[in-house]
Image (cartoon, rainbow, N blue to C red):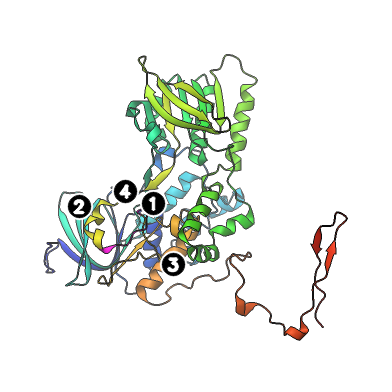
Amino acid sequence: MNTLSPDASPLYSEHDVVAIGCGPFNLGLAALASTVEGLDLVVLDARPELRWHPGLMFDDAKFQLSFLADLVTMVAPTHPLSFLEYLRAADRLYPFYIRERFHPTRREYEDYLRWAVSKLSSLRFSHQVEEMDWDAGRQRFILKVLRGDGRRLVMAARDVVIGIGTEPALPAALAALPSGKRLHTGEYLHRLPDVEAARHVTVVGSGQSGAEVVLDLLQRNLDGGGAVSWLTRTVSFAPLDYTKLTLEMTTPAYVRYFHTLPQPTKDRLVAEQWRHYKGISTETLEQLHDLLYQRELEQGLSDVELRCGVAVEASSVDGEGEVVLRCRHLDTGATFEHVTDLVVAATGYQQRSPRFLRPMDGLMRWDAQGRYKVRLDYSVELAPEVSGRIFVTHADLHSHGVAAPDLGVSPYRNATILNTITGREVYALPQRTAFASFGVPEAEARPRVREAQRVATPVVHDDAGRALVARAPEAR
């Protein structure tokens, strides 16, 4: 590609690392990198400022993780950009301590992120990466960047980290609806005038964001608002599985195990483990039930309908301007039509397709489904002639498992990336992270008993004649 020559021009700069995207994951990378001596890292983001899920920033919404799942603590608890340091700087340590709720509010977590932004000089907002390619002569990645003031820059980097996050996913069954008749949960609070004007709002899909929207709609319904329907294809309005040993699937120990599995096995496991990252918090489910119970004491309210095990297969707008959803009941196979005024798609998010990588198409390795081939250290497999490395954050669900979107594992991932980039252990990685063991026992770890010392295991039968294996007596 044609670029500016490396001269004294202010429109050209060289760096050790350029990170693209400044959400919590790459912000955490910048935070950890800020204390690494001699590392030149910059983070670029097309947005003018950091905002974290503003369309779902309900006043009382809780962060679903402990405050320990901040930008740095899980690998560097004394780091100056920890959540506790944020509380100290805001003079809120004692109120937070006395509150005895170690899950911050979502607004507080965003305020913490913005506080961290104010402490870092490596962040460049209003910098949109338009194109990226590999320059074999310079042995550097070359990035063309459009700045907010209209000026174009060229940046060269030895390594690149891509953390551009996800985008709202809209299934084909809802894609035919005009934008005025549907919205995604991610824009819910920005579309409140449409919500308030609708006589009947239907939420399609579940998960935490869908449940929070339904919670808001139910409160509006109690206050005299329109009818509410909630349709989801899941077999129930299922809670997040946050039991302790299940949470060990978000530890580095499980990540290391998961990465070794064949890709078809990984894809099956991710689909089976959906309740870990697509369920609904128990607290939200209790709040929903409380509101539904309150409705029993009221008269004249608009209807409320909850249906699980329902797939929306198509949608249209009829002659009267109403939305018609064609649905299938999954248990019985029966089909029916559902009529509403406005649809809220609680249909999750999908990986963004970075257009700026198109010049790299022949140099990057993708799997059969068009996903990055990601190594254990979060670097992407590249053509042999590329000596630089591309790392990804939050684009590794298929390769590293259900820990990928979990903010608690982000410091571990970022520390791994920084250790790889610098070629040394700038951050010590935790080794003992789970009580459970996930793979087969290693052969060399098994006790070896000489043939002469082996003791046969007695076979015992129950009353029905079924064989039961008793514990072998101890070898003496």
The residue at the far front in this view is 465
Which percent across, then down, holds residue 52? 40, 46
Q: Quadrant of the C terminus?
A: bottom right
Query: Disc 3 or disc 4, which is closer to the eye?
Result: 3
Picture quarter containing residue 122?
A: bottom left
Picture quarter containing residue 322?
A: top left
Is residue 446 found left or right of 389 in the rendered image? right
Q: Nearer the viewer, residue 276 or 100?
A: 276
- Vertical relation: 384 (above or below) 406: below
Q: Amino acid at mark 4?
A: Glu
Q: Which residue is mark 2?
A: 147
What secondary structure is marked by label 1?
helix
Q: Amino acid at mark 2?
A: Arg
Residue 237 shown in magenta: no
Is residue 304 found left or right of 387 in the rendered image? right
Query: Disc 2 or disc 1, which is closer to the eye?
Result: 2
Q: Quadrant of the N terminus?
A: bottom left
Which percent across, then down, holds residue 88? 49, 57
What secondary structure is marked by label 3?
loop
Sooner in the amino-acid sequence: mark 3 or mark 4:
4
